Amino acid sequence: MPSPAKSQPPRAWQRMLSGRRLDLLDPSPMDIEIEDIAHGLARVARWNGQTTGPHAFSVAEHSVIVERIVGHIQPDIEARWRLTALLHDASEYVIGDMISPFKAALGVNYKDFEGRLEHAIQVRFGLPPRPPATIKSLIKKADRACAFFEATQLAGFSHSEALGFFGRPPPGLDLRIEPLEPVEAQARYLARFQELMSAPDLKPQRLARPRPLRTAR
């Protein structure tokens, strides 16, 4: 007869500092808080930590820069799409920043898992679960531009190598990237989120207190 410990299903949720328990297999918008996202992303290193300087370059800082680049490329873009840009890597507060080759090696199941979490985050903050293709393309362009500057300034890539991998940044864009301490990166991420959420086309979502974790499947 199996022991009680062995008869229990493996834990598939994570407890957040907010008190929320996020079911990783079935993530609910009810269990997502921006404070948890900002805290986590400020402590997740881009480039697997292989960057210069006393601090890792965090996904939180990267996200703030990408949102700024989106505004540089398309200054009149709606606030909701700028918020989408700020949240474009928000799922990494749970799954970490996996480099693209590793994501490819893991295959479709990983992409499905990531997609479910991304959709829950979008819905939590009043955004369409699937942004229009034009918006996704714009954010990807900004993401690659940011990666170009990260690669050449922090990750040891030559200018020609970075051009080959990420393409040429948009005209007129010139960034100087300095990795921030986690507390500062977290604060800037939260501050930018609050600025965007004050826009007329965005409304904060009021959600109930943490719900009990579902254990039955």
Image (tube, rainbow, N blue to C red):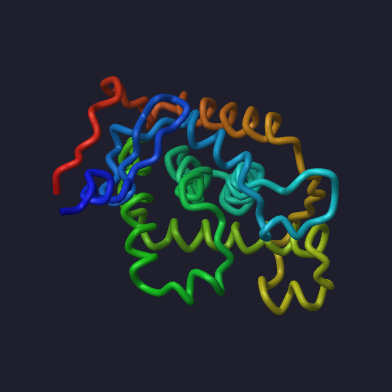
Q: Position of residue 142 (x, y in %)?
A: 60, 57
Q: Position of residue 188 (x, y in %)?
A: 65, 31
Q: Position of residue 163 (x, y in %)?
A: 74, 74
Q: Residue at x 32, y 46 (%)?
A: 11
Q: Residue at x 48, y 32 (%)?
A: 36
Q: Residue at x 72, y 61 (%)?
A: 171
Count of numbered labels shown in the rendering:
0
Which residue is nearer to you in this view: 44 or 72? Answer: 44
Residue 43 in the image: above or below residue 19: below
Query: For the N terminus, which image quadrant?
Result: bottom left
Q: Position of residue 64 (x, y in %)?
A: 62, 42
Single out the residue that lies furthest toward the front. 1
Q: Is residue 145 left or right of residue 31?
A: right
Which residue is nearer to you in this view: 130 or 8? Answer: 8
Q: Is residue 52 left or right of residue 19?
A: right
Which residue is nearer to you in this view: 191 or 40? Answer: 40
Q: Residue at x 80, y 70 (%)?
A: 157
Which residue is nearer to you in this view: 203 or 212? Answer: 212
Hey, which quadrant is residue 54 in on the image?
A: top right
Residue 123 in the image: above or below residue 208: below
Hey, which quadrant is residue 145 in on the image?
A: bottom right
Residue 115 in the image: above or below residue 23: below
Hey, which quadrant is residue 100 in on the image?
A: bottom right
